[in-house]
Image (cartoon, rainbow, N blue to C red):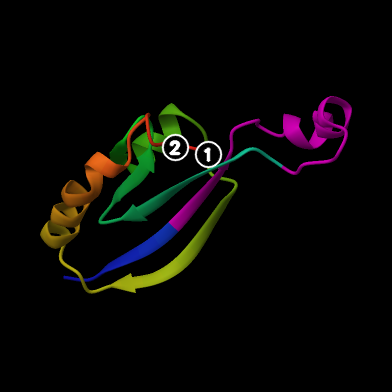
Amino acid sequence: MSSTVTLAVYDLSHGMARQLGQQFLGFPIEMIPHTGVVVYGREYFFGGGIQSLPHEQFASMHMQPIQMIPMGVTQISESLFLEFLNSIRSRYTTETYDL
């Protein structure tokens, strides 16, 4: 079964980075980005590790995306995708996170 893959882009500053970046940092910045990948109806994101929620739930609990970027369609089954995520989960932890 195929699924559309979309990149959800969020601004963690809710627009404040654009307004205050120059003042605080000495140079302008557009936003403080956060991204999630939406596939099989769920949004996969880093939050202390690989996590997922139904996309609508993530958006309603946290924030609305400022942009949704279509990335194509995957032919990989959801079960194979989840198996892959489980195989790499130990590499993506709070200890390995680096901005």
Q: Amino acid at mark 1?
A: Gln
Question: x, y percentage for residue 62?
Answer: 47, 29
Q: Which residues are magenta?
A: 7-30
Is 32 placed left or right of 69 in the picture?
right
Residue at 74 percent of width and 29 percent of height:
16
Q: Is residue 23 shown above or below 35?
A: above
Residue 18 magenta: yes
Is 41 placed left or right of 62 in the picture?
left
Q: Earlier in the sequence, mark 2 or mark 1?
A: 2
Q: Is residue 82 shown above or below 53?
A: below
Q: How far apart in space, not on screen, are marks 2 and 1 (Cα)?
A: 5 Å
Residue at 17 percent of width and 50 percent of height:
87
Which label number is shown at residue 56? none
Which label number is shown at residue 59? 2
Residue 11 magenta: yes
- Labels 2 & 1 near each other (Cβ < 8 A): yes
Q: Quadrant of the C terminus?
A: top right
Near mark 1 (Cα within 10 A), the count class, few <14, some 14-19 or many ≥20, is some
Helix, strand or loop at disc 1?
Answer: loop
Q: In which image quadrant can residue 6 be found?
A: bottom left
Residue annotated with mark 1:
64
